[in-house]
Image (cartoon, rainbow, N blue to C red):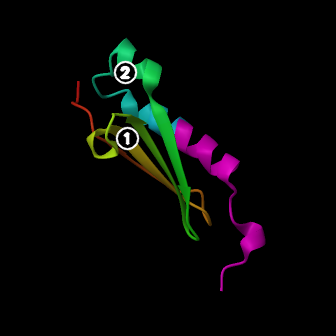
Amino acid sequence: MVNAAKLLGLSEMEAIAKNATFAALAGYVPPSNEEKAVMTLGKVVTDTEGIFELYIPSERPQDAKVISCAKVSRMTGEVRVEVFLQPL
């Protein structure tokens, strides 16, 4: 059984995801200024990880443009970032 007292909290995982996402986005074509103005960060915490999805919302949720998804292990702080933009 996992010891809940040792798991990373939302704010700790968000900081890890932010730094990793910023670094990962450096190799991709950035969104336009208009897109940047409306970008949103979706956050989900499960028993094992925090999921941080950077996206541009749309009128219909299924039409949102996902920029990146970072997953942070609550136990180790290990982060994986997937970017959905064109490489430079």
> Residue 31's spot in the image, x, y percent?
33, 22
Q: Quadrant of the N terminus?
A: bottom right
Report the residue marked by disc 1. 68
**Disc 2/disc 1 C-alpha distance (Å):** 14 Å
Other-residue count near label 1 (Cα within 10 Å), few / some / many at <14 / 14–19 / ≥20: some
Q: Most extreme residue toward the right, as rendered?
A: 5
**To which quarter of the image does residue 54 belong?**
top left
> Residue 62's spot in the image, x, y percent?
29, 46
**Residue found at x 44% / y 24%:** 38
Report the residue marked by disc 2. 35
**Residue found at x 60% / y 45%:** 14
Q: Nearer the viewer, residue 30 or 77?
A: 30
Q: Most extreme residue toward the bottom, as rendered?
A: 1
Magenta part mainly helix, strand or loop?
helix
**To which quarter of the image does residue 66 belong?**
top left
Residue 38, placed above or below residue 62: above
Q: Give amino acid for label 1.
A: Ser
> Residue 5's spot in the image, x, y percent?
78, 70
Mark 2 or mark 1, which has the lower sequence index?
Answer: 2
Residue 13, placed above or below residue 3: above
Q: Give amino acid for label 2.
A: Glu
Q: Most extreme residue toward the top, as rendered?
A: 33
- Pair 2/1: label in front: 2
Q: From the viewer's perspective, is 82 left or right of 37?
A: left
User: What secondary structure is found at the residue carrying circle 1?
Assistant: strand
Residue 30, placed above or below residue 2: above
Mark 2 and mark 1 in contact? Answer it, CB < 8 Å: no
Q: What is the magenta range?
A: 1-18
**Magenta-colored stretch includes residue 10:** yes
Q: Quadrant of the C terminus?
A: top left
Q: Nearer the viewer, residue 52 or 63?
A: 63
> What label sits on residue 47 in the rendered view?
none
